[in-house]
């Protein structure tokens, strides 16, 4: 049985894409080993695969990435593996160097358009460093895939390397027995710049009978909490924090509408296809998404919600009320979409990529 080392800088307990891929690979003939990092807020490991987490002297910024890749390279040099999978650009350097030095194949999974992240756009030095790493190491991969067709097309042309598409969809879930009775608006995901959360909070002044549930954590969480505290009228705003997957699914199923209204801040967000969109669909919750190509394509094709074309709090509030009041009209389309957009179907694409390595 061939051993695949899977490297990622995110939390091994909660990175659902990594855990789904690891499970599929384990079910299809691989001995899976995870390598991640432990940060101050990390909970004890609860994954079902062998895993190693490294503690770093820095927990953010370029120093964290440098230390992580050094530790990853050091670990891989002294442990047996037959194939290494780098998840995103921030784990690619160490994985690629180890694959070269030990003459083992490298696979690359790009979760997003990393060099076009809002945190890097406009920061010439940092973005230049990541661009250099991408140009140097991406072409060394023997197989590569990403989360949507737009990014696959960009990377394929950019590096003359065929990128496949493996969307970030969840496992299929049965339809909830009881439809939600409250007017709950759901946001799940990172609390970072450009996610549209500020507008969600501002929209609550027009929605006195609603609750906004915000599930996740991130760099602008404190600013968002302060903004919510300053909201003097309107509905209730609840910060749920980062939830375990099972609890997150239960919370999402209680929602009347799910939001994914990222701003058009650079090409990373422009081509975004967030996993929360598919989580809402599996929970049979109608969605409101940004007027951006990949998200709009899902909504237009599956007819599971509406597209926000005017980005003002009042327009968002009106659209929320429309979707909630017409929730029944989306029910059948949500069932159809949930039966199609799930990991049981999507994993077939993944198996096609890896079957040559078994």
Image (tube, rainbow, N blue to C red):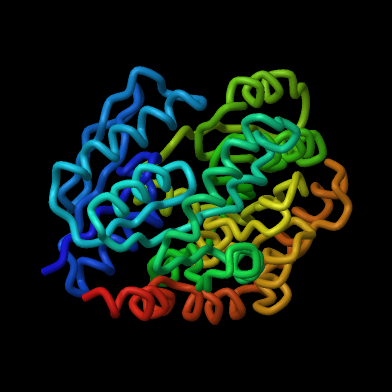
**Quadrant of the image occupied by residue 286:** bottom right
Compared to residue 147, the image places residue 215 above or below, namely: above
Residue toward you, 299 or 183: 299
Q: Residue at x 32, y 74 (%)?
A: 354
* Front one among 268 and 128: 128
Please give left or right for residue 295 compared with residue 102 in the image: right
79 horizontally vs 231: left or right: left
Vertical side of 319 occupied by 354: above or below: below
Q: Is residue 249 left or right of residue 305?
A: left
Q: Is residue 54 above or below residue 154?
A: above
Residue at horizontal 56 percent and vertical 55 percent from the top: 181
Q: Position of residue 104 (x, y in %)?
A: 26, 60
Picture quadrant where residue 273 is located: bottom right
Image location of residue 280, percent across then percent down = 54, 60
Q: Is residue 140 above or below residue 129?
A: below
Q: Locate residue 156, reporting x and y percent.
A: 59, 69
> In the picture provided, is 252 more to the left or to the right than 91?
right
Residue closer to the observer: 160 or 236: 160
Question: Which residue is drawn at the image coordinates 74% and 47% (left, top)?
Answer: 266
Residue 55 visible within the image: yes
Percent position (x, y) of residue 143? 41, 69
* Residue drawn at point x = 63 percent, y = 40 percent: 212
């Amino acid at each position: 049985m061939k051993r695949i080392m899977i490297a990622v800088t995110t939390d091994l307990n909660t990175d659902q894409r990594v855990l789904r891929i690891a499970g599929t690979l384990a079910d299809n003939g691989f001995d899976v080993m995870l390598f991640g990092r432990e940060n101050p807020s990390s909970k004890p490991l609860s994954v079902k695969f062998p895993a190693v987490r490294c503690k770093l002297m820095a927990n953010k910024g370029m120093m964290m990435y440098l230390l992580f890749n050094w530790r990853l390279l050091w670990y891989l040099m002294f442990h047996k593996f037959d194939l290494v999978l780098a998840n995103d650009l921030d784990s690619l350097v160490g994985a690629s160097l180890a694959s070269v030095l030990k003459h083992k194949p490298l696979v690359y999974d790009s979760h997003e358009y990393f060099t076009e992240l809002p945190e890097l756009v406009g920061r010439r030095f940092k973005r230049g460093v990541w661009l250099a790493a991408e140009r140097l190491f991406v072409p060394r991969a023997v197989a590569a895939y990403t989360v949507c067709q737009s990014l696959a097309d960009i990377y394929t042309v950019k590096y003359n390397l065929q990128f496949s598409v493996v969307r970030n969809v969840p496992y299929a879930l049965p339809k909830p027995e009881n439809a939600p009775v409250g007017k709950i608006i759901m946001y799940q995901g990172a609390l970072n710049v450009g996610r549209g959360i500020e507008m969600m909070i501002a929209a609550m002044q027009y929605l006195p009978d609603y609750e906004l549930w915000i599930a996740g954590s991130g760099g602008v969480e404190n600013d968002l909490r302060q903004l919510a505290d300053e909201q003097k009228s309107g509905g209730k705003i609840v910060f749920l924090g980062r939830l375990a997957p099972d609890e997150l699914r239960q919370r999402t199923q209680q929602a009347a509408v799910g939001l994914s209204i990222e701003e058009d801040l650079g090409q990373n967000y422009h081509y975004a296809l967030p996993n929360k969109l598919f989580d809402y669909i599996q929970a049979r919750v109608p969605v409101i998404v940004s007027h951006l190509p990949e998200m709009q394509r899902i909504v237009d094709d599956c007819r599971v919600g509406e597209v926000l074309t005017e980005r003002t709090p009042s327009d968002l509030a009106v659209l929320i009320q429309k979707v909630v009041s017409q929730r029944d009209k989306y029910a059948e389309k949500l069932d159809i979409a949930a039966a199609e957009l799930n990991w049981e179907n999507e994993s077939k694409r993944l198996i096609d990529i890896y079957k040559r390595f078994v």
